[in-house]
Image: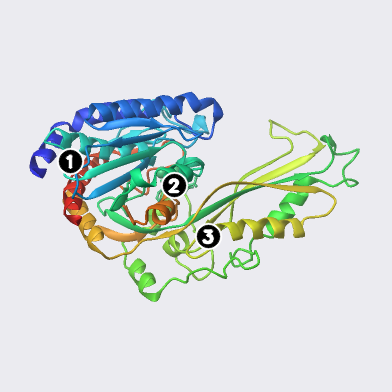
Amino acid sequence: MTEQVLRTIDAKKEQSVVGLREFLSIPSVSTKPEHAPDLRGCARWLADHLQMAGLKADLRETGGHPIVLAKNEHRPGRTTVLLYGHYDVQPPEPLDKWITGPFEPTIRDGAIYARGAADDKGQVWAHAEAIAAWQQHGGLPVNLTMLIEGEEEIGSEHLERFVRENRDELRADIAVISDTNQFARGVPAITYGLRGLVYCEVFITAADHDTHSGLYGGAIPNPANILCELLATLHEPDGRVNLPGFYDEVLPLSDGERDAWRKLPFDEPGWLRNLKLEQTAGEAGYSTLERRWGRPTCDINGLTSGYQGHGAKTIIPSTASAKVSMRLVPNQDPLKIVTTFERTLRERCDKTVKIEFASHGLAGSVLVPREGRAMTLAAEALQQGFGAPPTLIREGGSIPVVGLIKTTLGIDTLLIGFGLPDDRVHSPNEKFDLDALYKGTRTAAVLYEKLAGLK
Ligand code: BES
Ligand code: MN
Ligand code: MN
């Protein structure tokens, strides 16, 4: 049966891109309130498409952007697979850095360029196409529940409640997510670890309005100066994060893991060239892969104060703010880290100004078992789909739902991503290779067949 499904996928190779283009042209930017109708429209579009492919698909309300929930007809005794993905995307800015519009999907050099191409619409699409092909040949060999949400890029705020309240409906034997990367072109991967994330914002306020820097400068507190001093305390000279207890719970990398990562074919010079950089930077004593996959960080993501327009304006700003994210590793506790961050900055802050905090989104780190039947089956599927054996890797990004699936549904997740490290996710000119779409679709098709044998 799989042979026929794969032949259908081959025959639809060109046509598959047509649907993906439509999906990518919807600006489903979850963080911007003005795009709420686009998110709903995107969810509707996807649900209609899945319905046409032969699934029963609905929009489910969450209080935020809707979830698309789709199922085939479940039969007793079969393996049940929970497939998760997200249809929301990151903001496309800065717009002037895009060669073609972020929501005008364009094919160049064997890749489709658009916001969300790899993260995550293209990867969701690979599964949708594999599922559609199975439905044309008597239906999927597994019970499938597909949950595609619209708030992943903003921390999956309403998802926890939805999963808890619909625990029974979402029951499955295994979860599958394609929202990560291959290790390199031609080297597919299964991801067994993800970093967690906390995202904090800090606001400093002094005078109630911007003032003339000649008339007031030197005599009143400057929030921009004070914020910079504060942020400068966040790291030690050796690159370690300077917050009390930050490393207390950090699970050290094992020698075995460090050895295995050293043996991976990581092309560090090529990786740097892609960024037009000559040097890496980070915590002393760790390699680049170790720093990215296995060590926690603290990074300023955005910094705002004072005059930002052309030329000069002589003012003492009345406010300054920074967005700071921390990537976490097993077994750091996100809540504890946020609390420490806020308490410590408050203590360190000059007492002449007001300091306030907001916290946006939070995700636990993830480690899934590297052995077991599901892993073996996933490796076989990737081998068939990509024609190469997968490597086992960790990634530095975060996917909040993985922890939730483990705690509420009690199951592990297979992280089988089809993206490439140079896809520029979250950056201008995001792309997804058409080869990855094709091989990803084949992998997904084979995976459903393999997972049928899980039970
Ligand atoms: N798909 C990414 C995460 C990712 C990308 C993991 C590549 C591994 C390889 C996901 O959409 C993402 O960007 N997550 C956010 C989570 C946050 C908003 C809670 C992240 O990591 O910043
Ligand atoms: Mn994603
Ligand atoms: Mn993302």
Q: On the rendered image, what quadrant is the C terminus found in?
A: bottom left
Tags 2 and 1 touching, CB below 8 Å = no
Using a 10 Å C-alpha cutoff, classify the residue at mark 1 as few (fewer than 14 neighbours), some (14 to 19) or many (20 or more).
many
Q: Which residue is mark 3?
A: 281
Dot placed on the residue nearer the N-terminal end, 3 or 2:
2
Disc 2 is placed on an element classified as helix
Q: In the rendered image, which residue does mark 2 sit on? A: 164
Q: How far separated are the C-alphas under marks 2 and 1?
A: 27 Å
Q: Nearer the viewer, residue 179 or 297?
A: 179
Label 3: how many residues lie within 10 Å, few (<14), some (14-19) or many (20+)? few
> Can residue 47 be seen here?
yes
Residue at 37 percent across and 70 percent down: it is: 257
**Residue in the picture at 20% in, 49% down:** 447
Judge: label 3 CB < 8 Å from ligand 1. no
Q: Residue reaching furthest bottom? A: 255
Q: Quadrant of ligand 2?
A: top left
Mark nearer the N terminus (1 vs 3): 1
Nearest-to-viewer mark from 1 and 3: 1
The residue nearer to you, when weighing 185 against 452, is 452
Amino acid carrying mark 2 in the image: Arg
Type of amino acid under label 1:
Leu
- Of the 4 image quadrants, the one containing the N terminus is top left
From the image, tell me which residue sits under label 1: 140
162 to the left or right of 321 = left
Relative to residue 22, is residue 9 drawn left or right?
left
Q: Which quadrant of the structure image shows residue 86?
A: top left
Q: Position of residue 117 (x, y in %)?
A: 36, 36
Q: Where residue 278 sits: x, y (%)?
A: 48, 55
On the image, the x and y values in percent for residue 130 come to 21, 39
